[in-house]
Amino acid sequence: PLVTTKEMFKKAYDGQYAVGAFNVNNMEIIQGIVDAAKEEQAPLILQVSAGARKYAKHIYLTKLVEAALEDSGLPIALHLDHGDDFEICKSCIDGGFSSVMIDGSKYSFEENIALTKKVVEYAHAHGVVVEAELGKLAGVEDAVKVSAKDATYTDPDEAVEFVERTGCDSLAIAIGTSHGAYKFKGEPSLDYARLEKISSLLPNYPLVLHGASTVLPEFVAKCNQFGGHIPGAQGVPEDMLLRAGKFGVCKINIDTDLRLAMTASIREHFVNNPSDFDPRQYLKPAREAIKNMVKHKIKNVLNCSNRL
Ligand code: G3H
Ligand code: 13P
Ligand code: ZN
């Protein structure tokens, strides 16, 4: 059945592991992820961005997820990723999602609180849970200077006030991760001291890590080997993600690694099979590549195998 993240996060918090939240845009991506979670008997969050809804249409994605629920028998949460206003959150709540994110991180503290509160009131009245965000995810340049850190990373005391005043069910924090394939220029580093502080001030409260792809070197190398050009791509090392699970991080967001796994597989296929043009010929191995990558995450990075 479609479930909220409430119970998932409670178990993850107590077990000190994280649930994977994977971005979905089409059938093959959904099938690859869901088959992996089924084989690993892992809790699962499928998330849909505004861009995904625009690309595939809300109804196609919800019906595909409905099919995944029926086919797999797994409890799955369906989540809106980075909702940026009340309307898109309402539309997803009315349209069958079990969880929404309102991302007011670009607004002032008070405006973020007001917007998040409004979404929480509507969502809770409809049995839906809400993720909010406080702090701004760093870009490649941002993490260098301490002053930049303090300006953008999540302030621990503000986090407590934010959660108390909004009633949000989980909180995405900024501690040095960023979206996309270019997360760090030099050595990767996350502000664990800040994470520990936030977590200790919010006991039993689920935190969320965005921009948490590892940008797996094997897929980057494969893309580059078979005609791609993504030099210098770098993500969050796997041991750093595992460590985050010990400090209240219950949800780890992964999109870029799905994109890279799929693209690497398709690039390789076309170089090796230049005469192929039936989409099933390259989408089948691409779906398999996603499945294997997600199984690896579940086992070695999220630590959430056999946690149903
Ligand atoms: O946070 C961003 C996610 O990777 C979704 O990306 O907005 O291009 O669908 P998107
Ligand atoms: P990545 O770009 O690191 O996969 O992050 C995805 C994300 O945070 C979606 O909200
Ligand atoms: Zn994100």
Image (tube, helix red, strand yellow):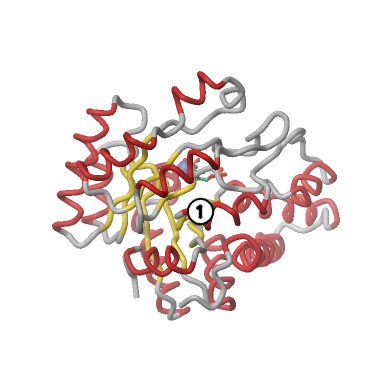
Q: Which residue is mark 1?
A: 252
- Viewer-closest of 308 and 84: 308
- Viewer-closest of 158 and 50: 158
Q: Amino acid at mark 1?
A: Ile
- Viewer-closest of 10 and 295: 10
- Viewer-closest of 159 and 20: 159
Q: Residue at x 49, y 44 (%)?
A: 210
Residue 166 x, y percent position in the rendering = 21, 43
Q: Place residue 151 in its image quadrant.
A: top left
Residue 94 located left or right of residue 138 = left
In this picture, is 88 found above or below 29?
above
Residue 293 x, y percent position in the rendering = 66, 61
Residue 171 located left or right of residue 91 = right
Q: Residue at x 26, y 46 (%)?
A: 89
In this picture, is 264 found above or below 14?
above
Quadrant in which the N terminus is drawn: bottom left
